[in-house]
Image (cartoon, grey):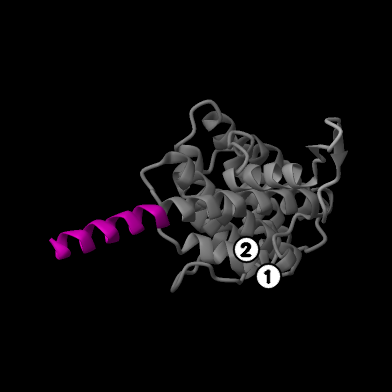
């Protein structure tokens, strides 16, 4: 019987941990999006450490919204780092930051219905920007390697392909296209789509609990005086 009780406690603890971790994920996603929306970064107040910790936790991954939130966090981090293209997110991989982000992005839009078509339309610009961040830093060797990876022969018929090929061929880090379409322009454009993903999520449960707690703690309470009259008092801080 004692052994059965231990197993029951362990199972309950595991379920509670999954729920708590999901709440923490909700909070991390909400906080990361607000910062990214404001500053295009995710580095304020050790937020990156929180994100890393959250992604490593165990979740009820059978839930679609959990998978999508984890992916959104991964995308935001990679977008914030995108210009530092030689950062490696995946161990023992030649993929640059934006190429790695593209893989996550494909998984994200694969689980979307209404937003899938719009998401697919973003892919050419992500592939192009993965090349352009190298071109702006005069690293045309890496740019050409990315170009070959992202545009196999059977896919070299879209409009952006010709533009990217022309920029690489110029070997000019100040090519007019690179000046007109900056990294910030790219991020801002993609952020419009990502916001539609984010808006599908509810406010974090722990956020609503905290908000309710603050409202109740700041509200005046009513007491009945010795004369039978009601008197309002402020809750002490």
Report if residue 53 lies within the magenta region.
Answer: no
Q: Extreme left residue here? A: 1
Residue nearest the viewer, comparing 208 with 32: 208
For this view, does 80 lie left or right of residue 73?
right
Residue nearest the viewer, comparing 216 with 142: 216
Percent of width and height locating residue 43: 71, 65
Q: Tell me the SS state at disc 2.
A: helix
Q: Residues within 10 Å of mark 1 (few under 14, many from 20)?
A: some
Residue denoted by label 1:
139
Q: Extreme bottom residue here? A: 92
Residue 184 appears in the rendering:
yes
Against 13, residue 230 (above or below) is above
Percent of width and height locating residue 111: 45, 37
Q: Residues within 10 Å of mark 2 (few under 14, many from 20)?
A: many
Percent of width and height locating residue 79: 66, 56
Identify which residue is drawn at 47% across, 46% down. Answer: 66
Q: Quadrant of residue 178?
A: bottom right
Against 29, residue 47 (above or below) is below
Identify which residue is drawn at 28% across, 56% down. Answer: 11
Identify which residue is drawn at 48% across, 56% down. Answer: 21
Residue range corresponding to the magenta coloring? 1-17
Residue nearest the viewer, comparing 114 with 13: 13
For this view, does 77 lie left or right of residue 149?
right
Report if residue 15 lies within the magenta region.
Answer: yes
Residue denoted by label 2:
143
Against 136, residue 222 (above or below) is above
Marks 2 and 1: CB-CB under 8 Å? yes
Against 235, residue 221 (above or below) is above
Quadrant containing the C terminus is bottom right
């Amino acid at each position: 019987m004692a052994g059965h009780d231990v197993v029951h406690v362990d199972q309950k603890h595991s379920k509670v941990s999954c729920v708590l971790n999901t709440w923490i994920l909700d909070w991390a996603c909400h906080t990361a999006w607000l910062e990214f929306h404001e500053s295009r970064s995710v580095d304020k107040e050790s937020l990156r450490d929180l994100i890393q910790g959250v992604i490593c936790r165990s979740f009820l991954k059978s839930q679609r919204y959990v998978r999508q939130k984890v992916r959104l966090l991964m995308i935001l981090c990679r977008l914030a780092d995108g210009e530092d293209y030689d950062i490696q997110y995946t161990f023992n991989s030649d993929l640059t930051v934006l190429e790695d982000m593209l893989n996550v992005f494909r998984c994200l839009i694969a689980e979307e219905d209404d937003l899938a078509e719009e998401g697919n339309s973003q892919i050419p610009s992500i592939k192009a920007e993965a090349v352009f961040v190298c071109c702006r830093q005069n690293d045309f060797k890496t740019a050409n390697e990315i170009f070959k990876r992202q545009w196999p022969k059977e896919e070299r018929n879209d409009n952006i392909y010709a533009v990217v090929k022309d920029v690489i061929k110029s070997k000019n880090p100040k090519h007019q296209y690179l000046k007109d379409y900056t990294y910030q322009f790219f991020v801002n454009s993609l952020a419009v789509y990502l916001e539609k993903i984010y808006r599908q999520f509810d406010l974090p449960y722990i956020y609503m609990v905290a908000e309710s707690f603050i409202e109740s703690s700041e509200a005046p309470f009513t007491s009945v005086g010795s004369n039978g009259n009601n008197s309002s008092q402020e809750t002490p801080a």
